[in-house]
Image: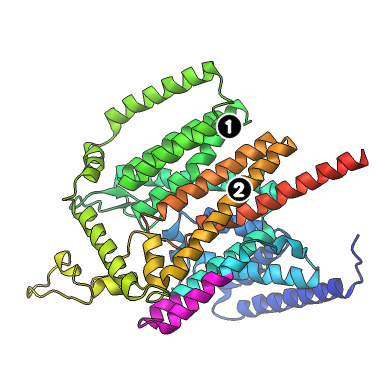
Amino acid sequence: MSNPYSPGNILSVLISNSLFIAIAAFAIYLFTTPYYTFAFVPILALITIFVFFKRPQYALFLMIFLVPFDIFRESLSSLKFLSVSKLLGVILIAIVFFRLVMYKQEVNRFKSNLWPFFVLFLTVALISATMSDFQETAFDDVRKMLTVYMFFFLSLAIVTNKHIKETLPGVFIWSVSLASLLSVAGYVFDISFFAMDISGKTLKRGVGASNDPNFFSSMIVFVTPFIINRLFGNYDVKTKLIAVLLLVVNVGGLVLTFSRTGVFIFALITVASLLIYRDKVKVKQMGFFLLFIAMVIIAAKVTIPDKFWQRQLTLSRTGDDSISRRITYLYVGWDTFREHPFVGTGPGTFHELYALSKYVTAYIDESAEGEVLHGSYYRDAHNSYLEIVVGMGAGGIVTILLIFAVVIRNFLKSIKQFLLNGDIEMALLSKTYLMSFMSQAISYAFLSFVYQKYIWLLIAVSQVVLHAAKGQGDQKEQGVLLG
């Protein structure tokens, strides 16, 4: 039991009381000004901070829930540089460090076999940014790297084994499913917030509440293993029926993104996830599942727009503009790597190089005078691995591959340990997290989202799960010795 008269507790009380008095005084002051209508804001802020201080996981889960809602996260703040997620992150960092200093929060939570690789990745990025011809862009990318490092740190500090098992899957499923529902509504009712190009001049595509249909499709793929876990895991009938409904909603959202790579990765991850449960599914259940699949295929044939099937077929056509343009990204990447093989041209600088390359003139729109604006055509590589190769050279790509390898190893060791401990459900859930991580690692080859939150969260989860498996194993071993 903690001592209420310890220096840490006394200082905590003094700080919290001083904060309360200051905010209350500010609220009273606002009542005497023309801005009296905003007097409730400081009080609301105080309540929010108090809740997050007592339950910091709420702030982290809110950040995770908001990942698919790019439009709302950015628009809820009048300050362009400060989004809701950044504000939550700043509050969380302050709370975690305060608890760490005042209450001597368990330091072992922050131990990770990934920190050395993070330090190496950051070192390569800083060297590359310092040597870059595009230092503003490069150092802004370093800032993004530090942001996801802090996200990793916060996840280690807050996420527990109970959260891994009970809370996080639900946050993932419901946030992405809600975004998928909005995407379907946006496509059907031409709501510009949730669908793009609703004028019909180009291909209309669902985006959920994100800014890009391809990014959104990767989120749906990410959440699919968790929905499948609800279908075949140890859950009641009501949960399974809800999972079926959410699977249909998310498949609908995926189809309306018209993302070719999204559909390909979805099929791959779905098959791999189903194989996880091959020993748990009875023959009768498999019959019902095959009947369900047949019904889905028939419904898909009837309801899915012909444009979707036509777009999927373009994957085999080399003449497709999108595919041929992506080939030029590889040419630019290879040419750059040959010139800067070790530390690249600076993190996040691919689009700068592509805008100045000889390939851009084949795709850039011409101005009214018929002149090509050669330096103004910026394109991402649509390949995070290529972005890293160009930006940080061999040092960067080797380090990120090592990070991914360690993450996969962490999950595999956790699965093995859970099986040894006899905890089949946690072993299956660890496989689910691994499948979701693999979905993002594959998507890395098709999208430029090096610092996407889901993949960096799962990097942290791999460490939390490993700690949990080892702790469970140690407890079992101690029990055997005591027995």
Span of residues in magenta: 119-140
Can the viewer see residue 178 in this picture? Answer: no
x 67%, y 66%: residue: 49
> In the structure shown, which secondary structural element does the residue marked by tag 1 occupy?
helix
* Quarter-of-image position of residue 221: top left
- Magenta-drawn stretch, dominant element (helix, strand or loop): helix
x 15%, y 69%: residue: 361
Label 1 crowding class (10 Å Cα cut-off): few <14, some 14-19, many 20+? some
Where 180 sits versus 278, above or below?
A: below
Q: x%, y% of residue 334?
A: 30, 66
Residue 27: image tag: none
Going by the numbered disc 2, the residue's amino acid type is Phe
Residue 239: image tag: 1
For the residues labelled 1 and 2, the Cα–Cα distance comes to 26 Å
The residue pinned by badge 2 equals: 411
Q: Is residue 107 left or right of residue 283?
A: right
Q: x%, y% of residue 115?
A: 62, 66
> In the structure shown, which secondary structural element does the residue marked by tag 2 occupy?
helix
Mark sitting earlier along the chain (1/2)? 1
> Outermost residue, left direction?
369
Return the residue nearer the eye: 302 or 455.
Answer: 455
Q: Is residue 394 left or right of residue 16?
A: left
Q: Is residue 84 left or right of residue 337?
A: right
